[in-house]
């Protein structure tokens, strides 16, 4: 790519932040009590902040509440990351409320990357619809488990561990991911480290970088 | 189809039984303790019957343990049901052990059906890869929530409720399902009712059928 | 019985539907968060639809909130099923809210049947107070585990699996069931299949029946 | 009673200790992983000490594994407590393994008492089969919720709280209790305080008693 | 001590009741749904009684919501128990809401005692900051597991079991306890038995005491 | 410090890796089934790899199994990080097996840092024993919640989110942390990103760095 690296990382950051917001706008209002009723379709218009999503009146629930169309089309991968992640979490798909599962669609331009991230509250399983991806996770023993997966392959990322997906095929790639939480959370670690405001001294010591180097990387994540 | 209805239902039953066995061969050896370690890849060759799958030595675990190739190809839909369900549960995909999630691939010939069934231990979420499906579930208030979903659509079937999928498009259909359990279980209700050996009198009373009518339907499920 | 089979099954269906409604009227308002307080007696009069039952003010809670009298008398078994199921779930017994358990009373006229059904969210354990019952469940391998139980016997039906109870003794029978959920849900499979509106084509293929035969059975469940 | 109070309490203690042992002999071998298979009938003859009960080979499981006859007859209430508690926990009823529920039968002679106790790991729900009982529990605010329940009544004791049952009717009484754990545990608090070997000084301070008074009560629990 | 034993135990009781109230004032409003969002800081000023603590608007949450200063200073041990327990549960520390953990600070005067008690809903782990404590718990087999722990030692009390802590060193002692629930509950068994209003006859039978002796002990807990 | 930055980060990495290994050596053998028995003390000498830690014979369990001495002394902070983290997880403290909680001791030299890390499976609560720490976590909305805490303060880090602790006081600092899992896992994100073997291209894109810069940072983590 001919874009400047500063713009590149900034765009990646913006793209991912947008995705994070798309993933979890009502983070603090979404909670998963045990499913003790058939369903409890969320009423996203409610202003009440309780531990969970306020539900629609049962009388207002139809089959349509259990359908989500948002994963039908590829996301826009014309960004620095060369990737797009479209969530189908409870915040986007209210019918998922209390049901303990969610989905997302991953689209990759050639060479596109979903940068290393964690899901604080879920395991993720991924099915490759098209293309070839280098996927991997890191264990708490800091061992990397990475491999290439192709169309039709399934890969599983254990709960809470750092992982990533990179398009290593020719052309585009698409995958469908499922997670065992209605609101698994997504934390892109590069952005969390360098774009959240953690003090320089912490990052200098953690990475063995000079303050200048830390600031240089931080600049890439400044929104 | 020109097949006799007896053969047809018998074949559907056999097909589904095979699928059930494929789904849950080691049912009693599979159990989901809370994920308290990064992973615990099952050792399916072990003869020990404990509450859970015995795990491989960590030293023997590689990235390949977290990949599953079994959903890459369409299943054989040349059967009475006109459908094929290929599981990626812990019994097929040992890397899923303790991770709380699984997948399956549904393929449909034209007019094919995955007959009404329940998952005793999981919610299911489904993504339509190709085609058009009539999908629905029945609530415990006996209300049917059914609709047609097309390529790219997502539908969710709440935990434990009766549901089905029928190909209503032209040509074939394919879907990928995820379930929030490593071993969700599958119970096809028609087969459970008429093919497990439940006494005639129970079925006569439950369905308002004569003994002759019950035997007639039972014959279709006789393996 | 001299009743017409149509009326019979319709009555069984109505009886069971009534029971289902009795079981789960406030389905969407009942939910089981982890018990993190001593108790949280439900306020069933509240109009708020949240994920769970709104609770009474603690100041208004008395010992009486933890007593339920509704299982004291036999239910009316003068119906087609020859059975009556009286629930003590959170919707009937608000003191159960958050406590993770519920009960029901099963009464049987001679030959009475609680038709094959599932509990989407609970295991059931049953104690025979009087009489003899044929009880059984079907596993996900489609194996039937059925036996006769007599006064004083206990039988357990694993979570989510199809099961039934039939009075095979002389005279009446009574049993007390407990379930490990405040709102386990009840789904009578015959009614869910033929009485919820699932399209004929699905049932024809699932049972190997003609459209006419399907309509014939459906007619029995038309309310 | 004409028995000496020392013998009396000692007998009550012995009776209850026997019951405790009956309740939890294989305490450390019983554990409840999430039910991720249909069932996992315990093999109580196994010498392996794992976190859970080792299971029978599925091929050896029959309907009989899900039946328990042990609650069919009244227990022997000719003891100091005037009560008998017969457990149907996983240790007695191996089919309960992993199923998250258990039962017990309570029998009372006239004036009989199941002394104040806790279940560390379960809520209890009780159905009065015969007689009248004074039942109650104490909240963590030290508020007593007690009332008389009669034949057919149901009472619920929230998880982990101190509770008791006393026969206040004429003649005998019988109740069936269910608990939402396969091995709820039972801790009789009087015996735990004065019969386990807790040092005198702790009890003197806790109860405001002299050493002599503490020893006097301890003597009643000495086995 | 020169205080009368009646005043002594009454003071111990009052002290502990105060501590209990401090522990669980909003018992019925606190509940732990699964953590499905990052956090849900409680709004303790809300008058709504739901199954859980109503949460602050996310916009109002700051780092300060995750800090608690209340364990910084020793509690007042100039009371009969010679101990002070300062809770950091959700009711005191709203940021803990939904996070599944809490803390408490235990301070002991010389010879001070935290009397035998249970936590209905949590395991407790304790770290000795200063001094020497005799700590122990009683199993459901009525076996006492007690030992002396010194500065820097850790001891764990399994979920729901009776336990106590006694200062056996010279001078004061301090410990920090953590519990795996935001609202574990505390039930002092002596007070629950003799100070909640349980009828004399129950206590007479349970302890083998005369009515006079029971009343004598009860008087110590009369508030 | 006069040490070369390469050595520094390498040492930090080594130190943290050692800590990780100390934290989770038997990661794959440790699992948390629901506590359905009083306790199940792990037998760490067992060679059996099951989903959970094999338990000691109950007959061999003593009070000593519930004591852990390993947090009694400060760890060695004479390393690049200037910190030491001493775990009391199930792998070190077998008595914790199945009990759902663990502890750790954090020691800081002046300016010492526990680098940014996540716990995949637990919430953490921390008590400052001595000194002043800058602590903080990052939400999934990439918002930093950081503040200074002093002796006696408590801070809570929600489950799975990135967090860190830095000694900002004069002199040393010590804290005790508790986590609501017997084996929470620890993943230091800098090391996971740059020290596990993730390909350069992934890191270049994720951080907006040149290959040279990535290799430069990787060199710091090369063990």
Image (tube, coloured by chain):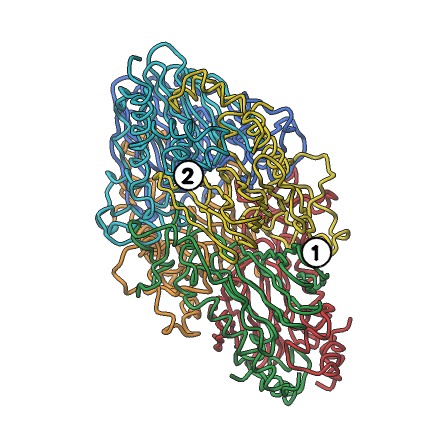
Chain colours: A orange, B red, C green, D yellow, E cyan, F blue
| Horizontal relation, residue D68 to residue F200: left or right | right
The answer to whether E52 is drawn above or below residue C173 in the figure is above
Image position of A77 with respect to D68: above or below: below
Residue at far top of view: E170
B59 relative to C145 in the view: left or right: left
Which residue is situated farthest in the bottom direction here?
C212
Q: Position of residue C106 (x, y in %)?
A: 58, 65
**Secondary element at tag 1:** loop
Q: Position of residue A159 (x, y in %)?
A: 49, 46
Estimate the spatial distance between the alpha carbons at disc 2 and disc 1, rounded to whole Å. 56 Å
Q: Residues within 10 Å of mark 1 (few under 14, many from 20)?
A: some
Residue topped by disc 1: B25
- Give the camera-side residue of F85 and F43: F43
**Depth order, front residue of D58/B39:** D58
**Is B200 above or below relative to E25?**
below
Q: Residue A148, percent across and down?
A: 56, 51
| The N terminus of chain F: image quadrant | top left
Residue B66 appears in the rendering: no
On the image, the x and y values in percent for residue F170 come to 25, 18
Residue ranking furthest to the front = D2
Residue placed most toward the observer, C218 or A5: C218
Q: Are marks 2 and 1 in contact (CB under 8 Å)?
A: no
Judging by the rendered image, the residue that carries numbered circle 2 is: E199
Q: Can I make out residue B78 in this image?
A: yes
Label 2 crowding class (10 Å Cα cut-off): few <14, some 14-19, many 20+? few
Q: Which chain carries label 1?
A: B
Which of discs 2 and 1 lies nearer the camera? The answer is: 2
């Amino acid at each position: 790519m001919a874009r400047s690296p500063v713009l590149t990382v900034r765009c990646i950051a913006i793209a991912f932040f947008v995705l994070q917001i798309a993933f979890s706008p009502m983070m603090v209002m979404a909670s998963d009590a045990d499913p003790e009723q058939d369903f409890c379709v969320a009423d996203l218009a409610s202003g009440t902040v309780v531990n969970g999503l306020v539900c629609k009146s049962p009388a207002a629930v139809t089959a349509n509440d259990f359908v989500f169309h948002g994963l039908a089309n590829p996301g826009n991968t014309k960004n620095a990351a060369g990737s797009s992640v479209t969530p189908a979490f409870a915040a986007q798909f209210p019918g998922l409320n209390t049901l303990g599962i969610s989905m997302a669609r991953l689209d990759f331009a050639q060479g596109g990357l979903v940068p290393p991230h964690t899901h604080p509250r879920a395991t993720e399983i991924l099915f490759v619809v098209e293309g070839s991806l280098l996927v991997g996770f890191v264990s708490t023993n800091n061992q990397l488990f990475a491999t290439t997966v192709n169309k039709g392959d399934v890969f599983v990322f254990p709960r809470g561990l750092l992982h990533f997906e990179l398009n290593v095929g020719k052309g585009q790639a698409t995958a469908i991911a499922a997670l065992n939480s209605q609101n698994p959370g997504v934390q892109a670690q590069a952005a969390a480290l360098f774009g959240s405001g953690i003090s320089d001294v912490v990052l200098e010591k953690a990475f063995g970088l000079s303050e200048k180097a830390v600031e240089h990387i931080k600049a890439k994540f400044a929104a």
